[in-house]
Image (cartoon, rainbow, N blue to C red):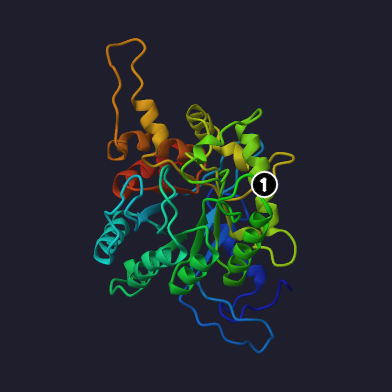
Amino acid sequence: MIPDFVHPVHGKTIRTLLSDILSARRVNEPPMLKVLPFPKYPFAASPTPYGFPSVPPTAKYRIVSSIDSTGTPGPHTTHIMATLNVTPDSFSDGSMYDTVPAALQYVRTSVESGAHIVDVGGCSTRPGTTLVSENEEMDRVIPIISAIRAQEREDVANVLISIDTFRWNVAEAAVQAGANCINDVYAFTGPDYPLVQASAEHLLKMRDVARRLSVPVVLMHSRGGDVRSNKDYSHYNGDLVRAIQSELGDKVEAIVGGAGGVRRWLVIIDPGIGFSKPVDAQYALLRNAASITADRPGNRLVGYPLLIGTSKKSFLGALLKRPDSVGAYKGRETSPHERVWATAATVACAVQQGANVVRVHDVLQMRDVVATSSAIWNGWDS
């Protein structure tokens, strides 16, 4: 673009606008920042005079930091994703929010407590559950999303919403109802593992929905399989981080590559803590989470934003029931509701590792953890 071209809205030249941006940046902040836009839905597309389909306006955007070749994250903001399971059988909050009034109260409380995005899920993936039908999943999530968008309070009505689903019809219906993002635990390939021809077909259909709707997508590493046995696919040859980079990298390249691919700047990576991995490896993975998207040769996940979800998961329960090897403490069995403090420790680690988003259940408590951890690792004004 010509440097002296005058921007039609701001009334300044491109040269001046760029100079303003550079002069406003903080010390040690990179001169160019990656931005992740979230489109605003519901949106009725209409033809444009230029022959291109119209695109939805941007609801909000987030600035994304990068991780260097040493695995060290730069200054960054960690955003909070509130977990809203509108199911009767989720491992932590099943049946607590499966009515519209209860779900709306959780959303209002979460927004007031500091949530930046609400993740709505209508199909539990906890071990031992059974996948519900597509129609039942839609019946659970669409009324909730529509009700959020219909709220009188602007901060609640305008909160970012992600739809937690692996089904393309549910994803499209949810976005059209008002969701801004798709969160898929199978990274578009569906629950089959090992991957089969149906997995490739599933990927293309999910990719088409995400591309047409121009929404960010959260792609999680897992090895699929029946949700009752996803923890059995846990044998990895060598380094777990490299295995994630390879397995999830293959899927991401298939999703963003070629004609019809999802835009790279709309992809968020989730290493899938708690899915298809040995219990002891979860802690090493969390401790080295920054390495997953580090700028290193051969890493196809370089530069993608990082989402980490550890809230109340069973790998924490496995640790808490271990006895003290040098004391009298015998360990204890815990329900998910008793793992808030353990979750707090993992959220602090996620902030230190450069997570752009943490997915949590207890927003108020974890907001305090994020704020304090960010002040420690990034500075008081981060």
Residue depicted at 39% across the width and 32% down the height? 316
Mark 1 crowd level (few <14, some 14–19, many ≥20, 10 Å Cα): some
Give the residue pinned by disc 1. 249
Q: Quadrant of residue 149?
A: bottom left
Left or right for 154, reference 382? left
Q: Nearer the viewer, residue 158 or 183?
A: 183
- Residue drawn at x 66%, y 29% is 237
Is disc 1 placed on a helix, strand or loop? Answer: helix
Where residue 336 sits: x, y (%)?
32, 39
Most extreme residue toward the top is 326
- Report the number of discs: 1
Q: Position of 262 compared to 133: left or right?
A: right
- Relative to 189, 370 lies left or right: left
User: Looking at the image, which residue is at 51% across and 30% down?
Assistant: 278
| Res 138 → quadrant | bottom left
> What amino acid does circle 1 point to?
Gly
Q: Position of residue 295 (x, y in %)?
A: 67, 42
Q: Position of residue 152 (x, y in %)?
A: 28, 75
Residue 222 against residue 321 in the figure, above or below: below
Residue 302 appears in the picture as rendered: no
* Image quadrant occupied by the N terminus: bottom right
Q: Quadrant of residue 331?
A: top left
